[in-house]
Image: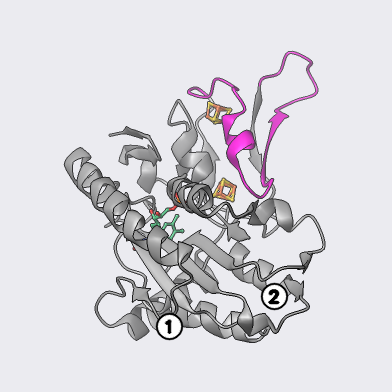
């Protein structure tokens, strides 16, 4: 069983590769959250958690899922092989330690941890940009090689394998910068749409994993164009899928992203 989350497709690609190699079920966390998050196991099925790093921590939606997760098994839960594979643009800080603590509360022990450095998706701060085409190619090539090695370790249920890029001063990044980022900056309040650019295609609504974006008419006039609206209901996990997938670059986060590139797995626009 592989529980995964992905906004812009990097982690989806990695999780699909692992699922193809192991034959494990692939479950998308936003869909699972619509159910009771209760899993009744009958075999010694392994667990994988795959997600992007957000602010050197697991994303809000992943933590919410783990808090609701209930697993029952005829075997001791710790007998199930449990691993995490995360993707990041640069470094993961103490993401795995934070995840491990959350899983421990559910009776699960995190046996092995892996990270892949992949093209950057965060563009909402002054110093954050998508990668250059060359850097993107280099990261993807390295990620393919790393993933090949990780898949072999996962297939063999290898324990105590830790292949992650934690970066410099992981504690400070996760528990100071990341803590501030995750407490204060995960919000849909700064999203706007440029009505002159929008072609009302509905892609933003379709790709939003949490159902936070819907196309709505601007007036009661039947001919009125429908534009994206964000619900401001705390469901946004800031994955930036709505921003990156828009074919018109009509969505912005504050004013800063107007001149930023767009990226999703398999596609980039500089
Ligand atoms: C809100 C947000 C926060 C991010 N924080 C980090 C981070 O702390 N460290 C990092 O290396 N990359 C960070 N990134 C980059 C993503 O982790 C990376 O691009 C990831 O592969 C995206 O995965 P996805 O395409 O499956 O959504 C962040 C991206 C977003 C959208
Ligand atoms: S994806 Fe872009 S162009 Fe399409 S409806 Fe949304 S904002 Fe408009
Ligand atoms: S509103 Fe945009 S950033 Fe927020 S969860 Fe939906 S797609 Fe992701």
Instruction: Tell me the chief SS of the magenta region.
Output: loop
Q: Does 171 sit above or below residue 267?
A: below
Taking depth in this image into account, of 255 and 9 the one nearest to the observer is 9
Residue farthest toward the left in the current orientation of the protein: 134
Q: Quadrant of ligand 2?
A: top right
Q: Position of residue 109 (x, y in %)?
A: 57, 83
Q: Around disc 1, counting alpha carbons within 10 Å, would you say few (fewer than 14), some (14 to 19), or many (20 or more)?
A: some
Region of the chain picked out in magenta, as a range? 196-225
Q: Position of residue 239 (x, y in %)?
A: 51, 52
Residue 270 appears in which quarter of the rendering? top left
Q: Which mark is residue 175?
A: 1
- Coloring basis for residues: one colour
- Mark 1 or 2 closer to N-term? 2
Residue 213 appears in which quarter of the rendering? top right
Taking depth in this image into account, of 175 and 256 the one nearest to the observer is 175
- Tell me the residue that label 2 is attached to: 67
* Residue 1 in magenta stretch: no
Q: Is residue 120 left or right of residue 159?
A: left
Q: Is residue 94 left or right of residue 166?
A: right
Q: Is residue 236 left or right of residue 84?
A: right
Q: Please indicate, yes or no, whether residue 53 appears anywhere in the rendered image.
A: no
Q: Please indicate, yes or no, whether residue 185 appears anywhere in the rendered image.
A: yes
Mark 1–mark 2 distance (CA, rounded to whole Å): 20 Å
Q: Does 238 sit above or below residue 115?
A: above
* Residue 211 in magenta stretch: yes
Q: Does 236 sit above or below residue 244?
A: below
Badge 1 marks a residue whose secondary structure is helix
Q: Position of residue 255 (x, y in %)?
A: 40, 45
Badge 2 marks a residue whose secondary structure is helix
Q: Which mark is residue 58?
A: none
Q: Position of residue 98 (x, y in %)?
A: 50, 81
Q: Please report the residue visible at 34 percent of the width from the left and 54 percent of the height from the top.
A: 148
């Amino acid at each position: 069983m592989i529980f995964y989350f992905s906004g812009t497709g990097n982690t989806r690609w990695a999780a699909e590769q692992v699922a193809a190699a192991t034959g494990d079920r692939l479950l998308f966390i936003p869909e699972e959250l619509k159910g009771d998050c209760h899993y009744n196991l009958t075999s010694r099925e392994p667990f994988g958690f795959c997600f992007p790093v957000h602010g050197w921590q697991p994303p809000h939606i992943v933590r919410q899922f783990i808090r609701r997760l209930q697993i029952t098994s005829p075997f001791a839960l710790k007998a199930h092989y449990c691993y995490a594979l995360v993707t990041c643009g640069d470094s993961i800080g103490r993401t795995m330690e934070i995840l491990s603590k959350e899983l421990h509360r559910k009776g699960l022990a995190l046996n092995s941890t892996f990270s892949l450095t992949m093209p950057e998706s965060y563009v909402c701060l002054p110093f954050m940009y998508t990668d250059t085409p060359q850097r993107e190619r280099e990261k993807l090539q390295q990620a393919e090689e790393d993933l090949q090695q990780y898949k072999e370790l996962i297939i063999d249920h290898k324990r105590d394998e830790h292949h992650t890029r934690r970066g410099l001063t992981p504690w400070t990044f996760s528990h100071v910068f990341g803590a501030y980022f995750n407490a204060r900056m995960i919000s849909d309040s700064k999203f706007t749409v440029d009505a002159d650019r929008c072609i009302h295609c509905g892609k933003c609504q379709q790709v939003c994993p949490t159902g936070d974006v819907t196309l709505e008419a601007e007036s009661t006039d039947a001919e009125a164009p429908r534009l994206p609206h964000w619900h401001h209901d705390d469901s946004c996990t800031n994955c930036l899928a709505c921003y990156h997938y828009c074919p018109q670059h009509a969505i912005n986060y504050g004013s800063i992203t107007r001149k930023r590139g767009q990226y999703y797995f398999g596609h980039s626009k500089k």
